[in-house]
Image (cartoon, rainbow, N blue to C red):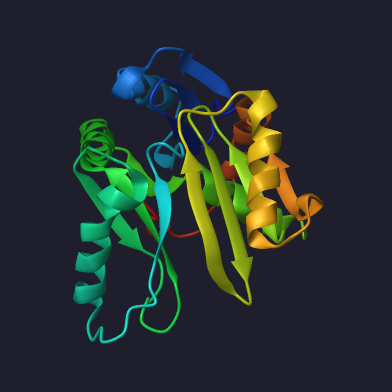
Amino acid sequence: MWWGAERVDVYVGRDQCWVGGTLAHPGAERFGELGSALERARGRGVTRVAVWLSGDLAKPFLLGPVAGLRRWQEALALAQAMAVEATGSIDGCQVVLEDWPGERPALAVASPSKSIDTIHIEVRRLKLRLQSIRPWWCRVVDRDGEEGVNSVAMAIEDSDALTLLREADGRPVLARTYSPLPASDQIHALVARAALAEGVAIDEFRVWRWNPEADLDHDARTSAADTAPAAGASA
């Protein structure tokens, strides 16, 4: 339970909004329930919010390597220009570039601008502190490392999408999102095809199923003692 915690983890997707391990509303299309969910959290003592975006709202893609880049703003502008083609998004989007793409591929993340703006507006309205806005799949990758697994490749399911990620020699080599979320019986086939294309064994892909009651409640149980400084937004 997150009642009485200073921080709460909020998951936002196209059709779902979760506060801690509690579903705020099953039909929160485009953040329709976000404001009221945050208001209830504030009324129960929450002062800080960490927001996690679904794979459909935070789509990863690879940029580079690109010869001749000189400045960070050039790289960011290139990522912005590529975002629509790379992710299939038709909305205006904001792009975060995770690394320099000059010598090797870098991971970039595209999110709809309207979604990011709505989060900031609601948090400011309720005078809450926004600790971070990050992709849900990023939280899962973090937890994979916290558990000491450090998977070679991951297939991460959420309410909207399936995100495939892989690193090799310390650099990203696969970043792909399937949205809407494929049916359960299709996920194994998608992972098998990705493993074949990437030249890895299928059992090297860790498949993380969508289980918000357990995963978000885990975060909430530890959040009251969390005194770390605000994380930079990753999406």
Q: Quadrant of the N terminus?
A: top right
Residue located 72% across and 58% down the image: 151
Residue at the image position 23 percent from the left and 46 percent from the top: 93
The image quarter containing residue 20 is top right
Q: Position of residue 162 (x, y in %)?
A: 55, 37
Give left or right: position of 71 versus 40.
left
Q: Is residue 137 above or below residue 228?
A: above
Residue 57: horizontal and vertical position, in percent? 37, 38
Which residue is at the front of the view, 99 or 5?
99
Name the residue rendered at 22%, 82% in the picture: 71
Given residues 188 and 102, the one toward you in this image is: 188
x then y, percent, for residue 210: 63, 31
- How many numbered marks are there? 0
Q: Name the residue nearer the viewer: 51 or 234.
A: 234
Q: Quadrant of residue 191 in the image?
A: top right
Question: Is 162 drawn above or below residue 16 in the view shown?
Answer: below
**Residue 230 in view of the camera:** no
Residue 229 visible in the displayed image? yes
160 relative position to 97: left or right: right
* 74 sits to left or right of 98: left
Q: Nearer the viewer, residue 197 or 181?
A: 197
Q: Residue 128, position in %: x, y?
A: 32, 38
